[in-house]
Amino acid sequence: MKVKMFMRKAVACFGSLPMLVAFFLILAWGASAQDVLRQRGTCGFVPTQESIERVQALKAELDRLGWAAYRSGDVVYVPLKIHLAGTSNGTGYRSEAAILDMVCELNEQYADQNIQFYIYQGFNYIANNTVNNNPGNASLIMNGNKVNNALNIFVCQSADSGGIGETLGYYSNQYDWIVMKKTEANGYSNTLPHEVGHYFSLLHPFNGWDCTWWQESIHGNPVSSTIAPCPSGAPPFGSIQVEYVDGSNCNTAGDLLCDTPADYNLGFADNDDCNYTGNCMDPHGDVLQPMEDNMMSYFGGCPDYEFTPMQKSLIAANLASRSYLQTNYTPPATEITFTSLDVNTPLDGSTTDYYNVVLFDWEDIPGANHYLLEVDILPSFNLSPVRKISDWSGAFIYDLQPNTTYYYRVKPFNEYYTCAGFSSVYSFQTSSTVGVQSLDFVRDVQLSPNPVEQGGKMFLSLQSDHSFEARLELWSLRGERLWVRDEKFSLGANVLSLPTEDLAAGLYLAVIQSDEGLISKKFVVR
């Protein structure tokens, strides 16, 4: 238990293990306490007058309707549009596995509020150095990628927005999106649950101290001013009261909520064991007793974090006010459990027919309608992994190296349930034989209707940049060729009929194969 708590502490305080190591090196080199504090991970959320007024308006509504008014027993599903930023040459994206783990952790943290999140229409990849390294200067590009009926999350190399410490993530009041540092996208960090709290209108319990932390030499003990040191609100900057321990001004000070104790950003400087033992006193001389395990605080090392009842009510009221979110949709909520992957090809230890086009195929896993396939030359999958998300139980991977041993594994998921682990690791050897390539001159390949009723007509349509001859084939996912016909395609639009009379209900592949390459499309017969 002590090791687990220490690791959670490291993540909450420093964002990643390398930062923790750097922290101890700094101590060893004799750096000042101020230098050490600058290494700590923080939230880049900046309270504005609008955010203060939003809390005040929601509180007034809850006072009128009752604080449990929006907290029904029904689960509300919130769509997440996750944007993965990479370099301009299309590399450096955060792995999809880490994102799936991040969504799993987010759902666990909000489960007791009957708020759950689902991935809206897959991931969006943005190959742009500015978005990746300096998202604060890329608002035009990001706004062009923003989806208006979902909570938008941009996962970038850097999320730094200035201020104390290193920014691990922030919610932007202006653009209504969340920016996450890539290293914080994982299955154990609380950065995203914290930022989602800001998205749903929560302030820090230490609101008014966001730009600094209590220091006796600067602020006195007892604190000498009744006005918090950091302004809240856009110019002209407003001011916020220093919150008193006795709660007498809790409605107008701090985060404006009365069940979150006074906190002068004490977790930023006292972040050791989720147990504050300092003697910081408010202007009345009362010693602060902050809520160390509050999700919106900066204390680390807590085994778990939570929201208070008033915070939960505020979240529910804010969610109800966001009418643009597509919350009238219930995603597949099946929990995915599997003990092993039933592999069809390539079998463990086998050699593939070709090296530059390899078919991966496995049996369906109950509850999964998407699969993440990872392929690498190391079984740790951390050298140069090829990753592909497929919406059927298989995928084609192109351009592997000849006569090379590869390893692969599969992670099943659906748009809501992302908590399943990876399968066992399988290996295969590529041959020295060159397979066919993709047909780059063929575009807009469609099968319709798809799904198709058994015995019904299905049409293949495509656009070609020049005429060509090819073989049309229908395959089962077990590798059985069920139908074949030679065909001539003309320049421009082409529409052909494909037979389904002899096909049982299930999933199939339609393949266009010529001397220049091949294209495959899946279809469903029902």
Image: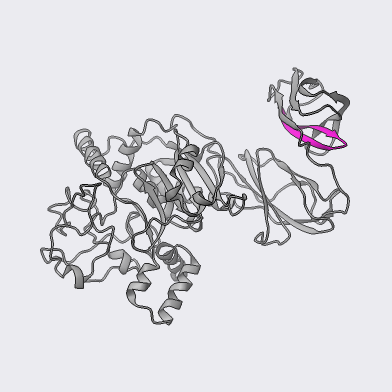
Q: Is residue 20 above or below residue 54?
A: below
Residue 170: image location, x then y, percent: 39, 51
Residue 515 is a magenta residue: yes
Q: Is residue 297 above or below residue 481?
A: below
Residue extending farthest left: 284
Q: Nearer the viewer, residue 42 or 345?
A: 42
Residue 66 lies left or right of residue 522; in this view the side is left
Residue 100 visible? The answer is: no
Residue 71: image location, x then y, percent: 32, 38
Residue 417 visible? The answer is: yes
Identify the residue at image location x=16%, y=70%: 220
Residue extending farthest top: 456
Identify the residue at image location x=28%, y=44%: 51
Residue 266: image location, x then y, percent: 27, 65
Residue 455 lies left or right of residue 24; in this view the side is right
Identify the residue at image location x=46%, y=46%: 138
Residue 111 lies left or right of residue 182; in this view the side is left
For residue 315, which quarter of the picture?
top left
Residue 335: image location, x then y, percent: 55, 43
Identify the residue at image location x=15%, y=66%: 223
Residue 510 is a magenta residue: yes
**For the magenta stretch, what is the residue range?**
507-526
Predominant SS of the magenta segment: strand
Which quarter of the image is occupied by the C terminus?
Answer: top right
